[in-house]
Amino acid sequence: MTIALIVKLVHILLGIGLVVGIVGRDVTLRRAAWADDLGTVHALLDVADVFERILVRPMSMLVVAVGLVSALLQGVPILGFLVGGTTNWLLASVVLFVAIVLLVPTVFLPRGRIFAAALAASDGQGVVTPELQAAFHDPAVERGRLAELIGLIVVIALMVLKPF
């Protein structure tokens, strides 16, 4: 077994961890959004936070770093046609990953502050308020989460199929 294969295996395992983290977080947040008890909301938000902190954040950076090392060890040109290569699926994957990462400062962080304020107001009243429900169902965040998931699926398809 070569170092290139070991690094490729680690990349795949990190990718599995990232998928588990994103799906686990999103399912938990979806359940929290429909809860009518503030204690349940907080418990589910705590679980979603574990997925986010333990899997999504670290795995998203590690999977890219290890993936790039894997590509280099295998001799796959990361920049594809930009450097005269013919393997463009990796470049497309990197571009998609950057687009997904850009959702954090443009959508998730600003809307997260709005959500935090709605949660604090709900805590102050001791009930799930309509504002908290609205924050849970923020269309921009829902579209962002969907785009994140679709982007992840496309990146996986590009890595497996290597269509171009």
Image (tube, rainbow, N blue to C red):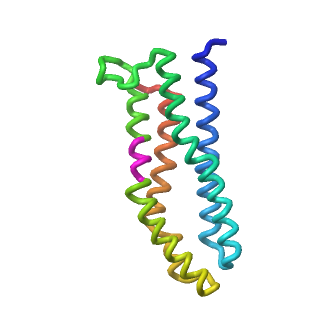
Q: Is residue 153 above or below residue 116?
A: above
Asked which quadrant contains residue 48, the reply is bottom right
- Residue at point 46% right, 15% down? 75
Q: Which residues are magenta?
A: 98-103
Q: Is residue 2 above or below residue 153?
A: above
Q: Is residue 26 above or below residue 59?
A: below
Residue 81, x across and y down, in percent: 31, 22
- Residue at point 61% right, 52% down? 53
Residue 20, x across and y down, in percent: 64, 46
**The N terminus is located in which quarter?**
top right
**The C terminus is located in which quarter?**
top left
- Residue at point 35% right, 23% down? 80
Task: State left or right for residue 27 relative to residue 156.
Answer: right
Task: State left or right for residue 50 relative to residue 103.
Answer: right
- Residue at point 43% right, 28% down? 90
* Residue 28 highlighted magenta (yes or no): no
Name the outermost residue toward the top: 1
- By secondary structure, the bulk of the magenta-drawn segment is best described as helix
